[in-house]
Image: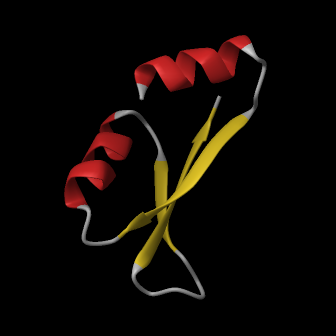
Amino acid sequence: MELIIDYAKSERLRTISGDVLKENVVMIEMCRQLGFEIKPDPTEPDIRDVRLKL
């Protein structure tokens, strides 16, 4: 994931975002440690929206 973040920065992207199942606690914790903002998806209760501003 750190390589993806570095690549996105080198391409001058402003944001990385994705959807994660709420039960995928390992992925959610990794995103939290990397600084992603994590919010519930307003239309899908089993999904978390993860977003990192670059």
For residue 23, side relative to residue 36 (left or right): left
Image location (x, y in percent) of residue 7: 61, 16
Image location (x, y in percent) of residue 18: 56, 54
Viewer-side residue, 6 vs 52: 6
Q: Residue furthest top?
A: 10
Query: Which quadrant is the N terminus positioned in?
Result: top left
Residue positioned 22% across, 60% down in the render: 25
Query: Which quadrant is the C terminus positioned in?
Result: top right
Residue positioned 76% across, 17% down in the render: 11
Residue positioned 56% across, 15% down in the render: 6
Using the rendered view, name the quadrant where residue 16 is placed: top right
Q: Is residue 29 above or below residue 24?
A: above
Q: How many marks?
A: 0
Using the rendered view, name the quadrant where residue 47 is placed: bottom left
| Image color mode | secondary structure
Q: Is residue 4 above or below residue 21?
A: above
Image location (x, y in percent) of residue 2: 42, 22
Q: Residue furthest left?
A: 26
Q: Is residue 23 above or below residue 5?
A: below
Q: Is residue 51 above or below residue 47?
A: above
Residue positioned 37% across, 44% down in the render: 31
